[in-house]
Image (spheres, rainbow, N blue to C red):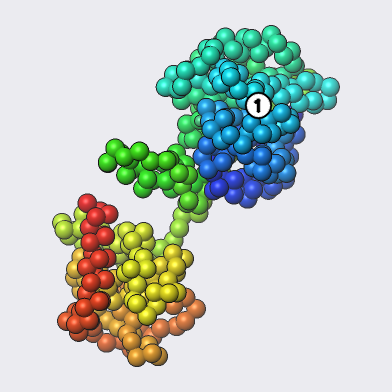
């Protein structure tokens, strides 16, 4: 028998990445059962009926939870009929619970349990070990699986040593970072943490900027899930059909493709410059990446402002960007004449030609060899352009300091 167990699904990006990868992984590994941890599925906290049903439609046979089980009240409206859900057996004593999900495989009875840890976690009603002893007594089965939703690696390792002879799979969830300690310990498969399905460029699935803001200012924030391309994390575990003991455990981790810098000649520029006024910005790629989170409607030329979107972030940003780039790296600013009489500005540094705002022209061919030197004085004679340049520069300095 084979089980695929996917780690904590965090918010929309986590749900997307599950929907994206699960069908092909099911075709590849042919698991008999799929288990997912859904405690962060609804915007990072809890689960809703709609999300529960979407996991069922994707083929989840069991959905385990954790410390956020009841963070979204919507669960209370359907927990009675959510027969694939398993909730932690040692917390939330005043809430309805689903302490076990039974599965059947070739006449064998499989029990899936969910526990939360007590180290660096909210208070529990029963220690994980005592709760698991009780569950084993109350729900006899041939094969037992435990999702141990806990913070401390040591606590997870302890549970394995206490229960390896009566449980065939203990997976850790909750930390959102996949560990490389998967093993089969005397017939019990184990991993300290499966890792998450959620925004990869994040702080354990949460929005980085929001968390940095909280750390820097001490302000209360909401821990919104990161809206970045998702990572998928799971394990595939094989069990002996006769003995019901684990035979192997494999980690799966699918990271999003590294985003490639989208500017012209990104792969050709090699200069590296240290300008103490702009710490951390040494290459054209550094500057492009920093500006990618800064370019906005306010820094866009007024005539294009209506059409500006985050997807077309470089629209109307060329001259202010090129002169800011010159502040940092030196070199020259050139302009390609456009049909409307304006110039599209780009940079030449140490003889290397690159164009940080070329993405707005995707599909069009600009002739960079027919370009003319651009003067700061002429461009900034327009007060509104000078102000946009000042704003872009100010935002960059704030970001890197
Ligand atoms: Fe958690």
Q: Is residue 342 above or below residue 82?
A: below
Query: Percent from the top left, x then y, of residue 68?
Result: 53, 31
Count how many numbered circles sit on residues in the image.
1
- Residue at 37% across, 45% down: 210
Query: Percent from the top left, x then y, of residue 280?
Result: 24, 54
Which is more toward the observer, 369 or 60? 60
Query: Percent from the top left, x then y, of residue 59?
Result: 72, 40
- Residue at 33% across, 61% down: 294
Q: Along the horizontal axis of the image, is 204 left or right of 394?
A: right
Visible in this render: residue 65? yes
Q: Is residue 150 above or below residue 48?
A: above
Question: Which image quadrant is residue 376 in?
Answer: bottom left
Which is more toward the observer, 379 or 18? 379
Label 1's element?
strand
Q: Along the horizontal axis of the image, is 217 left or right of 79?
A: left
Identify the residue under disc 1.
Answer: 86
């Amino acid at each position: 028998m084979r089980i695929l167990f996917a780690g904590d699904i965090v918010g929309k990006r986590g749900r997307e990445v599950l929907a994206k990868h699960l069908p092909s992984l099911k075709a590849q590994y042919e698991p008999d059962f799929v288990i997912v941890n859904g405690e962060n599925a609804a915007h990072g906290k809890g689960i809703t009926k709609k999300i529960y049903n979407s996991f069922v439609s994707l083929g989840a046979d069991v959905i385990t939870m954790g410390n956020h089980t009841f963070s979204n009240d919507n669960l209370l409206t359907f927990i009675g009929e959510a027969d694939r859900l398993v909730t932690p057996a040692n917390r939330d004593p005043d809430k309805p619970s689903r302490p076990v999900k039974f599965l059947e495989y070739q006449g064998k009875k499989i029990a899936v349990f969910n526990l939360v840890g007590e180290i660096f976690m909210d208070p529990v009603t029963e220690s994980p070990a005592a709760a698991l002893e009780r569950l084993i007594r109350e729900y006899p089965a041939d094969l037992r699986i435990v999702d141990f939703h806990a913070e401390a690696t040591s606590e997870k390792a302890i549970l394995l040593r206490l229960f390896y002879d009566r449980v065939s799979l203990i997976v850790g969830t909750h930390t959102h970072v996949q560990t490389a300690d998967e093993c089969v310990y005397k017939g019990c498969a184990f991993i300290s943490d499966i890792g998450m399905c959620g925004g990869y460029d994040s702080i354990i699935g949460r929005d980085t900027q929001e968390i940095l803001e909280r750390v820097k200012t001490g302000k209360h924030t909401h821990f919104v899930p990161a809206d970045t391309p998702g990572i998928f994390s799971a394990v595939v575990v094989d069990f002996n059909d006769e003995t019901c003991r684990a035979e192997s455990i494999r980690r799966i981790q699918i990271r999003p493709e590294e985003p490639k810098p989208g500017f012209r000649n990104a792969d050709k520029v090699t200069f590296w410059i240290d300008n103490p006024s702009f710490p951390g910005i040494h290459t054209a790629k550094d500057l492009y990446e920093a500006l990618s989170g800064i370019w906005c409607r306010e820094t866009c030329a007024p005539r294009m402002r209506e059409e500006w979107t985050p997807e077309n972030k470089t629209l109307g940003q060329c001259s202010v960007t090129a002169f800011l780039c010159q502040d940092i790296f030196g070199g020259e600013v050139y302009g390609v004449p456009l049909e409307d009489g304006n110039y599209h500005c780009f940079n030449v540094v140490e003889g290397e030609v690159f164009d940080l705002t070329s993405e707005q022209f995707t599909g069009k061919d600009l002739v960079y060899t027919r370009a003319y030197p651009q003067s700061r004085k002429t461009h900034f004679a327009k007060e509104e352009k000078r102000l946009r340049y000042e704003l872009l520069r100010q935002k960059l300095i704030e970001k890197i300091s």
